[in-house]
Amino acid sequence: MKKIVSSYILLFALSTNLLADSPSFDFIEYGYTSVNIKGESKNFVGYDLRGAYSLGDNFYIGGDAFNADISGVFVRKQVVTIGLGYRYELSSNTTVYTELDGVVWNPHGGGNHENGPELSVGVKNKVNERLELKAVVEYLNTKSYKATTFVVGAAFRVFDSFALYSDFNIDSDDSRYSVGLKYSF
């Protein structure tokens, strides 16, 4: 885990910014996700769907949904968020942003949904025309669960509008990684 975080930090530090544009806030990501929860002998696996759409120069709407379960057991972890974000370009290739989401969280499957807010603060850096890195801190607050999550991620563009992405999330109770395809428009 320390190696993953260290490698993302190293990539940020060594960014060359050659021919880099501003990071995109118009995208859809879909991929595989795996969640490791403390005290569980098996990982939860499933899908991750995320997107954002710009509403002018500084505002955007964003959302995320992931669904993961343990194979052969009806134990499911589901999270759906949707909210409004604000972004500010620090430079031509670096953007800081904050997002306030409404969250529907279902930690155990069935009808035990909880609602609450999630606040995110992050930075995206377009290292060059192919590589985009991000670092985010998220705070979730529901009736029975409060968590601060740290996220690092990268997207490597393979075609004009398509990239491969990877994210790693960690908080005090679990860690999650996601890999998949990102479509920017």
Image (cartoon, rainbow, N blue to C red):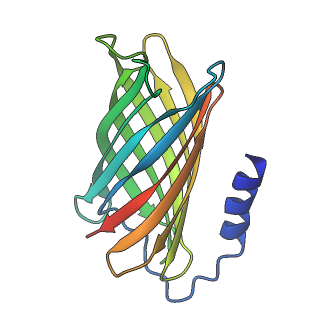
For residue 21, above or below residue 115: below
Q: Residue at x 77, y 48 (%)?
A: 2
Q: Residue at x 50, y 89 (%)?
A: 19
Task: Specify whether 89 is left or right of 171.
Answer: left
**Quarter of the figure with the C terminus:** bottom left
Camera-side residue of 79 and 41 = 41
Task: Specify whether 148 is left or right of 104.
Answer: right
* Residue 87 in picture, x, y percent from top left: 40, 57
* Residue 149 in picture, x, y percent from top left: 57, 36
For residue 102, above or below residue 107: below
Q: Is residue 91 visible?
A: no
Total tally of numbered discs in the picture: 0
Camera-side residue of 75 and 184 = 75
Picture quadrant where residue 25 is located:
bottom left
Q: Residue at x 41, y 38 (%)?
A: 46
For residue 122, above or below residue 103: below
* Residue 131 in picture, x, y percent from top left: 53, 74
* Residue 183 in picture, x, y percent from top left: 31, 66
Q: Residue at x 23, y 63 (%)?
A: 56
Residue at the extreme left: 55
Camera-side residue of 38 and 53 = 38
Task: Specify whether 147 is left or right of 39.
Answer: left
